[in-house]
Amino acid sequence: MSDDDLVDFYINDADCRSQFFGAMKADFDRFGPLSKRRVLEAIEFILSSGQIDKFWGYVLPHAVPLDEVEDKPGYLRALYEKLAGREPLLRDFDSDVELVDAIGPHGIDVRQ
């Protein structure tokens, strides 16, 4: 988004969110299968963890004010549905699961 677009952008507006998710989906579609799986599992983990506020910064670009999203769980579910084409699964992740936001073999690697 350009600076002018960001001035008029409001994360809770359905049209703005739709445009934003569309851009995210276009980027997501260029990821390899492993990277796609990791992104979707990260969102599932955040939704399943019950700690959305703790992990919120992992899923929203910092150019958007993070505290402005009124319904964070709804936002994450809608994002997941846009990326995956289906509803997210609420899963019981083992207690040793860790969410890593680094590029490389233990993070999201868009080159795969």
Image (spheres, rainbow, N blue to C red):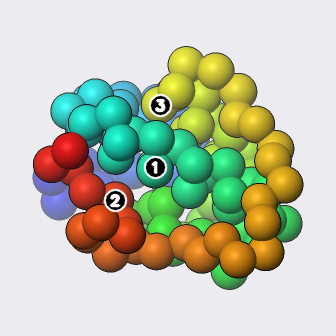
Image position, residue 59 (x, y; %) = 49, 60
State which quadrant residue 31 falls in.
top left
Sequence-wise first label, 2 or 1: 1
State which quadrant residue 28 falls in.
top left
Give the numbered dot on residue 20: none
Sequence-wise first label, 1 or 3: 1
Give the numbered dot on residue 108: 2
**Callout 2: few (<14), some (14-19), or many (20+) C-alpha neighbours within 10 Å?**
many
Query: Residue at the top extreme?
Result: 85
Instruction: Identify the element where label 2 is drawn.
Output: loop
Tell me: residue 37, above or below residue 10. Answer: above
The structure residue drawn at horizontal position 46% and vertical position 49%, both measured from the top left corner, is 39
Instruction: Name the residue type under label 1.
Output: Val
Image position, residue 90 (x, y; %) = 82, 44
Image position, residue 50 (x, y; %) = 84, 66
Question: Could you tell whether 25 is left or right of 92 in the image?
Answer: left
Instruction: Name the residue type under label 2.
Output: Ile
- Of badges 2 and 3, nearer the viewer stands 2
Question: Could you tell whether 27 is left or right of 75 in the image?
Answer: left
The structure residue drawn at horizontal position 46% and vertical position 62%, both measured from the top left corner, is 60
Instruction: Name the residue type under label 3.
Output: Leu
**Callout 1: few (<14), some (14-19), or many (20+) C-alpha neighbours within 10 Å?**
many
The structure residue drawn at horizontal position 30% and vertical position 66%, both measured from the top left corner, is 105
Image position, residue 84 (x, y; %) = 52, 27
Spatial separation of the CA atoms under disc 2 and disc 3 = 15 Å
Spatial separation of the CA atoms under disc 1 and disc 3 = 9 Å
Q: Nearer the viewer, residue 81 or 95?
A: 95
Question: Could you tell whether 77 is left or right of 104 in the image?
Answer: right
Q: Nearer the viewer, residue 13 or 64?
A: 64
Residue, disc 1: 39
Sequence-wise first label, 2 or 3: 3
Residue, disc 3: 83
